[in-house]
Image (tube, helix red, strand yellow):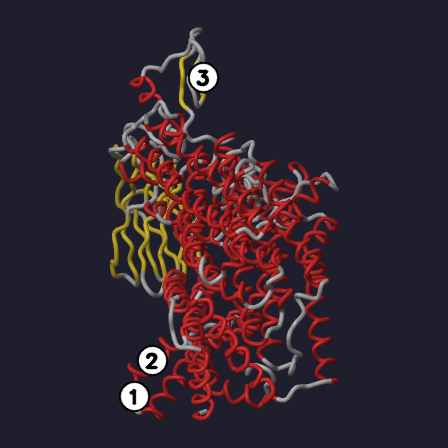
Amino acid sequence: MLAEIGLGALLLAFTVAFFALLTAVGAGLRNRDDWLRSARNAALLTFPLLLCSASALLLALLNGHYQVSYVWSVTDPTTPSFYRFTALWGSQQGSLLFWSLLLSLYCFSAILLSWREHRRLMPGVIAVTMATLAFFLALSLMLENPFERFWLAADGDVLRDVFIPAGARAPDLERLAATANGLNPLLRHFGMIIHPPMLYLGFTGFVIPFAFALAALASGDLSAAWIRATRRWTLLAWMFLGLGLLLGGRWAYDVLGWGGYWGWDPVENAALLPWLTGTAFLHSVLIQEKRGMLRLWNMLLVIFAFSAVLFGTFATRSGLIESVHSFARSEIGFPLFAFWSVMTLVALGLTLWRQRQGLLRDERAFAGLLGRESLFVLNNMVFAALFIAIFWGSFGAPLVSEVLLDAPITLGVDYYQQVTPPLFAILFLLMGLAPLAAWGNSSLRRMGTGLRAPLLLTLPLLALLALAGMRTPVALLAYGLVTLAGMVALAEIIRGARARVHAWGESWPQALRALFSRNRGRYGGYVVHLGVTVIGIGVIGSTLFQAETQRTLARGESLTLQNYELRYEGFNEALAGDGRLLRVAVVTLSREGREIATLRPRIDVFPQQPMTIAGIHSSAENDVYVLLTGHDESGARATFRLTINPLINFVWWGGLLLLAGTLIAAWPGGANVATRRQDSALQEAQA
Amino acid sequence: MKGTLLALVLTLLTLPVLAQPASDDEVNRVAARLYCPVCEYVPLDDCETAACRQWKAEIRHQLDAGQSPQAIIDDFVARFGQQVVGTPTDPTLRALALLTPWALALGALLPGALLLRRWARQRKTATPSQDALEAQDAQNDYRARVEADLHARR
């Protein structure tokens, strides 16, 4: 019954989305308000319908309805309830349905929140969002249906179909349960409850800015309205995508057993590309808001961000790339490729058309090369270069070399470590300089004055690092740039608060609170910069100073790395409740002769594959990461890989700051433009 | 003289016996530069599939036989193709891989550079004063607020 309910709701959602698309297009063409209201109601209905459909699948998963082939493929009777829940997005069909659900949630919220204020753009917004939703629902219905069931044909063959085939009957449920596949062991991790939803919320969120952009292009209303409507949605999607990337890194660190969090895998990169485009947009959109410039460029960025989402979805779900992160090869590849091409070409065509009409012309002229606009343009150029380098490494070069030169190649970590560091260095430099430049024109003197305090804080820190033994010029340069960027953000926050303390006699906590609540975008942005700085410190430390060794030890033997000693104490085996065999080594970790931890690195043996789970001793200074990579039959001898990851926890802490900053910036409300200008003037006067 | 020669011969004969077998770290250093033949994009040192264990055993064997890390990598490339390394070793493919993104990035940067140039020219011909810009800002903000109020009343 659950399968019928889920399928019915899915079918209805598709019909309703298609109806909304047609009526929205009609309303736009014929200027019919009644049709538009009808389109809105239909579009709003898709969310409850998909919620019903996804709930039916979730109930089937939780209650072990193994006749539903999706339930059979991602759970078995030993699967704990927690993983039955996460199994909703554990494979292609379920995750596509979940994707559509989140997409409909965004459409629902955007239509409700923007209906009054952006009525003129609504036909386009509804048409684009519903076209996208209808496409993904069609994929679910026709190619990757999560409600397909097993049937037993009269001749004994097992069939998979949505409806009961003629002469077939339901198979024996107990037998189905006994043969059920179970969830992919790689997905049995706590992070799976939150990593995919965050990533999908990020991906699907970019549909809203794209829809507003296309609506503005189609209607010709290219005033600041579409930009005002989209900035907060972009920020939200960008935040979720960033969180998804960070949580994915944590999952890889805990589960994949290689001691790192970012492997420059094409699937990871496919998620990074829209995030980079979104970051560029969040900066350049400020120029359009403040100065009416970069109107064409912003339009292109919004289009490319969503285009990158669609391309990433195609690359991950079609089987184009084989990776630990990707889904199995599927028939949805061609339709996804076609949809990506059509959407991108239509959007670019509309942009070209409006550009030729002069509707995307900048409203103002440029005032100086040192102005914030110029630095933001430079920042965007570097983001574009990063996008190209990563796209080329992940998809371009492997495809070109295989198709044109018949020589398949892999571009791995070596490639990215050669190409990306200079670009990231420029980005951090600009992150330090741009907040000091004024809108319009600025001067070297002004920037020099602003840089004085951050430099005074950065240089002693570098001297301390050099005295502590860090002599690598690359590391010192990298830490210098990253710290300077962070210090500038910190100095700007302090400068703003100090101005209020002096002018209004407020206490420091009051001044900081007022500062953040009155200009959330600006100061939330600075907190984001601080978060990126902290992440940068972690990335540099764990990349440049990672140390590693591997040895086979007999019980009682030890190995040393830097000032750590690892002693192999014992080995045991146990059977977990979900059927996996745990092979656990017990090791003690000492530092300078003092025992600091007992760790239990282990190998989880699932029927499908073994998984290496690290034993980790975490501190602010580093992570000591111990892997059990092999052992003999009795466990008398075992092989350990010991990795020291300096400052790696800064990556996760920086992520939390990034989240906090984005929430501050995206929070509704705040002071109006005039008040913000008054605050800025006050700050200038105090400076 | 005879004694010296005998000592030399004995030393040369016992060298292979005394030579240390390759350590796990030495094997991993070479394996880190190669990619798993089964799981795409996973470096060999991080992979525990049967194929990768076999390759790592082969690397150990070649190191024990006195081969240099580069010779081992070249041997793997010769046998399995360029996709076993993280950056191609073939000069043409290497150039294609490493130079193309810079060329493409320069191509993409060009519009930005042209934009800055155009802005600089516009500035020379007509630079609005800071006051004028502020006034325009205020007018735009005022207009935006009026529009927002009108929308709210609708």
Rendering coords of residue A454 (x, y %): 46, 83
Alpha carbon separation for disc pair 2 and 1: 9 Å
Q: Amino acid at mark 3?
A: Leu
Q: Amino acid at mark 1?
A: Glu
Identify which residue is drawn at 72% across, 54% down. Answer: B95
Nearest the camera: A121 or A513? A121
- Horizontally, is A128 left or right of B114 in the view? left
> In the rendered image, which residue does mark 2 sit on?
A514
Q: Amino acid at mark 2?
A: Ala
Nearest the camera: A38 or B3? A38
Q: Are marks 2 and 1 in contact (CB under 8 Å)?
A: yes
Rendering coords of residue B56 (x, y %): 52, 40
The residue marked by circle 3 belongs to what chain? A
- Horizontally, is A527 left or right of A19 in the view? left
Q: Which mark is residue B136?
A: none
Residue A28's place in the image compared with A456, above or below, is above
Identify which residue is drawn at 48% across, 83% down. Answer: A455
- Mark 2, secondary structure of its residue: helix
Local crowd size for mark 2, using a 10 Å CA cut-off: few (<14), some (14–19), many (≥20): some
The disc, 2 or 3, on the residue closer to the chain's N-terminal end is 3
> In the rendered image, which residue does mark 1 sit on?
A506
> In the rendered image, which residue does mark 3 sit on?
A159
